Image (cartoon, helix red, strand yellow):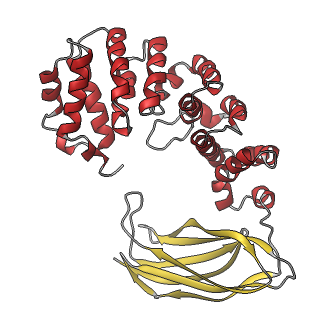
């Protein structure tokens, strides 16, 4: 979410103030802006700014929570986009003791931004009631509510509070997701697939079994299964490889594996190439991945798997090339030293070579 915080410009905040003044004479605009532009504002990241704005609304709209929520609900249609995640964040901040009022508000706000983060404290506090709510959202005519039924209950949703109850046992949500496994909305299907992928990290065999049950009945469902099993594919889960037709064969191998240059600087590419040989008389369905074995602080290497390609290769030889860029990212710290790259075809390591990374 880098640079997202810059979306909270003066004109953006003034628009919100104008909307709120239009909806309620109780909203204290000057106090709101005073709360926003304190000594911390310029240092806050995107999600921190969301909470900061929610706190400022709490101060500037000094009404009982149910009344304040009604005003925000009236304002919501004029406030669309990811920047307005502070609407559901206001609910998370103030509404945990008001389940019914808060859920009604989140149902509105998720249409204009998303309630996938804010709903999670309610799931933790009220698991039984929220599973019943999930049942209602799943059959909604509104794709935003159907997506919330999946996205809000994802056990390992990025940037969000984890749901330990469903990390330990995903059965309650997994059974309900079956009702969304051929949803007409791609928006919903993406969430279902990501939900399955979350569960696969803790219960790989459970998702592999489910994939076998779901796959081959509907094109929408097949897309969900393929996308939802991406972690299992990276982990070479045998059931999933076989399900998708990626079967290891002695007739397929590689030759002339090369890595260039042998010394790579940060900001540069390393290129690896090889000749793929299919000695069989028929086309072969192949998933080709590669692993970069990054040097860690302790001097050991740790692999990170990357998808390369997945398609059918005809009989004969095929020259394959790939470039990998080394650039600074927030989720990884790089260390100078010997790195390795490995090539995998249908879950089988074919070859491995080293190169030096210099910072």
Q: Residue 78 location in percent, x, y?
A: 33, 28
Dividing the picture into quadrants, the one containing residue 317 is: bottom right
Residue placed most toward the observer, 342 or 176: 176
Residue under the point 73% across and 45% down: 221
Say left or right for 225 vs 124.
right
Residue that lies at the very extreme toward the bottom in this rendered image: 256
The quarter in which the C terminus is drawn is bottom left
Q: Residue at x 82, y 85 (%)?
A: 279
In the displayed structure, 263 sits above or below 289; it is: below
Q: How many marks?
A: 0
In this rendering, is residue 234 above or below 158?
below
Q: Name which residue lies at 38% across and 39% down.
A: 82
Please report the residue visible at 42 percent of the width from the left and 33 percent of the height from the top: 113
Residue 97 image position (x, y, % from top left): 42, 13
Q: Is residue 222 left or right of residue 190?
A: right
**How far across and down, in percent of the image, does residue 169 sit?**
67, 33
Horizontal side of 249 relative to 35 (left or right) equals right
Q: Is residue 193 left or right of residue 43?
A: right
* Image quadrant where residue 95 sits: top left
Figure check: 205 above or below 127: below
In front of the other: 107 or 291 = 107
**Can you give x and y, in whole percent of width and height, for residue 217 in the image?**
81, 45
Q: Is residue 276 visible?
A: yes
**Residue 118 appearing in the image:** no
Residue projecting furthest to the right: 281
């Amino acid at each position: 979410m880098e640079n997202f915080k810059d979306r909270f410009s003066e004109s953006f905040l003034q628009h919100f103030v104008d909307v709120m003044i239009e909806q309620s004479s109780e909203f204290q605009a000057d106090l709101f802006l005073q709360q926003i532009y304190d000594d911390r504002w310029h240092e806050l990241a995107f999600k921190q700014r969301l909470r900061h704005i929610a706190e400022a609304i709490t101060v500037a709209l000094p009404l009982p929570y149910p009344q304040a929520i009604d005003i925000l609900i009236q304002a919501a249609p004029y406030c669309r986009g990811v920047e307005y995640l502070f609407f559901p964040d206001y609910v998370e901040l103030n509404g945990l003791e008001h389940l019914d009022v808060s859920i009604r508000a989140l149902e509105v706000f998720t249409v204009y931004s998303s309630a996938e983060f804010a709903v999670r404290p309610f799931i933790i506090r009220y698991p039984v009631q929220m599973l019943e709510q999930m049942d209602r959202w799943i059959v909604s005519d509104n794709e935003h509510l159907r997506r919330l039924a999946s996205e809000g209950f994802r056990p390992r949703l990025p940037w969000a509070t984890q749901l330990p109850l469903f990390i330990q046992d995903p059965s309650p949500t997994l059974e309900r997701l079956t009702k969304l496994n051929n949803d007409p909305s791609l928006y919903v299907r993406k969430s279902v697939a990501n939900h399955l992928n979350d569960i696969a990290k803790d219960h790989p065999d459970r998702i592999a079994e489910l994939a076998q049950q779901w796959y081959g009945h509907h094109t929408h469902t097949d897309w969900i299964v393929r996308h939802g099993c991406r972690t299992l594919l990276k982990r070479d889960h045998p059931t999933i490889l076989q399900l998708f037709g990626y079967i290891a064969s002695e007739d397929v191998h590689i030759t002339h594996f090369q890595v260039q240059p042998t010394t790579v600087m940060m900001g540069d590419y390393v290129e690896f190439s090889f000749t793929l040989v299919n000695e069989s008389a028929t086309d072969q369905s192949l998933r080709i991945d590669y692993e970069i074995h990054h040097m860690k602080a302790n001097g050991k290497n740790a692999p990170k798997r990357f998808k390369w390609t997945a398609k059918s290769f005809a009989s004969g030889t095929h020259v394959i090339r790939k470039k990998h860029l080394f650039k600074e990212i927030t989720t990884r710290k790089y260390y100078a030293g010997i790195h390795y790259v490995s090539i995998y075809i249908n879950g089988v390591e074919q070859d491995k070579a080293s190169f030096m990374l210099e910072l």
